[in-house]
Image (cartoon, helix red, strand yellow):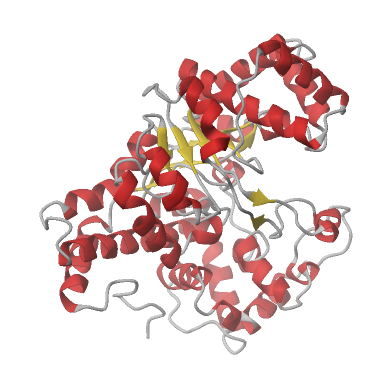
Amino acid sequence: MTLLSQDRLFPLEGRARDLARALYDGIRDLPILSPHGHTDPRWFAEDQPFPDPAQLFVTPDHYVFRMLCSQGIALTDLGVPRADGGPTETDGRKIWRRFAENYHLFRGTPSRLWLDYSFENVFGLDRRLSSDTADHYYDHIADCLQRPEFRPRALFERFNIEAIATTEAATDDLRWHRMIRESGWQGRVITAYRPDGVIDPEIAGFAENVALMGQQTGFDTATWGGYLDAHRARRAFFIEHGATSSDHGHATARTEDLPQDQAAALFAKALRGECSPGEADAFRGHMLTEMARMSLEDGLVMQIHPGSRRNHSDQVLAMFGRDKGFDIPGRTDYVAALRPLLNAVGMDPRLTVILFTLDESAYARELAPLAGVYPCLRLGPAWWFHDSAEGMRRFREMTTETAGFYNTVGFNDDTRAFCSIPARHDVARRVDCAYLATLVATGRLAEDEAPELAHELTYGLARRAYRL
């Protein structure tokens, strides 16, 4: 018995299915480029065994525990740590049994595809997870995790990962990246510059973060000029540790190109904690344009991830902190929002700005037309809630006719769940091959062009876009 169909996600129609299968066979074993994500660099620095199956698959993965939470299972019962250090379940087997008893909740979801792929292809399991098989799964995975071939570096190599990017705050000391580099291990684990904590006046601790950045760089970050110079210095520090990109996760895509005196005045208000919500949004918007200008100086690719209404539940935020599954997509404007940045630097082909969205209605109406004309713009893949077979298909259908393939950047998995990385890339490869096969079968793409495109969507576009 196998957990997964060998023809999953391929077209139903015979010729298109055969074409998709042939295209997939040509690219299935290409190396994985993971240019944006949230795996922990400490895993690769220390190369210690993962603690237990629950700590690997359940407790750190908000895709998993948010679904269980939606059915009334307390986050504490899943081992999610509390912000105040209060009691939470620590028995991995108990957490795993709760997960297994409720595994049916994931039917039809991308999480089910990723998990079954990991169970079958990483751990060699061939019986479906359920309450009856929970202990068998737990014991088998726990035994595997004690073996050298299941440590983080060995899995990295087994997964055929050519490069993986983690994401660190602008003030991070990057100790784990330094430790990886000094260890002599050849796996390529790079960082990405995430300056939200020193750009967003509404993030708790903004002024303290800015002061710390000043201490780290020797610049006077109480002044506007010193603040900008400190960003340049921190970006250079990140580049020394392998960074090829910056990442910006704002609530909106708003950009501004303010006169420098106005920007300096807003910055001073932000440091004093006196910005109104509108002023804070304007400052974030102006800093996106400043970051784009710095990218022209130092070559970092700029990623903009707007549209998440973060920490929707005040109760969950207070008890568990950020990033606990309660970030919800919202409507997002791009045409008016990006115009100031694009008028400032958008025609310069040396700049690469990769746009993501959680608002699918913007694909055909706004994002594809923008990326289809501005030299600096590229479209990031279907992201987060749309990182799914149907989401990927909709992305291709709504963007290709206007933006083409070459104004997109391939796939990135954007995950904290290490074992899901090959699973997610496999889904993307299958969906793209199915889409290309459909174009060939319906006379919209020459058959001899499809293999080259499959290679580009799997590998070439990401490598060039992220300067890997």
Depth check, front residue: 146 or 448: 448
Depth check, front residue: 94 or 355: 355
Which residue lies at the image location 24% right of the left edge and 53% below the top edge? 454
Is 316 located above or below residue 11 in the figure?
A: above
The answer to which image quadrant residue 329 occupies is bottom right
Which residue lies at the image location 82% right of the left edge and 27% below the top edge? 208
Quarter occupied by the N terminus = bottom left
Which residue lies at the image location 54% right of the left edge and 44% below the top edge? 44
The residue positioned farthest toward the bottom in the image shown: 132
Q: Is residue 182 visible?
A: no
Q: Position of residue 165 (x, y in %)?
A: 50, 40
Which residue lies at the image location 59% right of the left edge and 44% below the top edge? 306
Is 226 located above or below residue 113 in the figure?
A: above
Q: Position of residue 216 (x, y in %)?
A: 72, 18
Quarter occupied by the C terminus = top left
* Horizontal side of residue 372 vs 173, given as left or right: left
Q: Is residue 285 visible?
A: yes
Is 179 located above or below residue 289 in the figure?
A: below
Q: Position of residue 347 (x, y in %)?
A: 40, 23
**How many numbered circles does the render carry?**
0
* Horizontal side of residue 112 vs 249, given as left or right: left
Q: Position of residue 349 (x, y in %)?
A: 36, 24
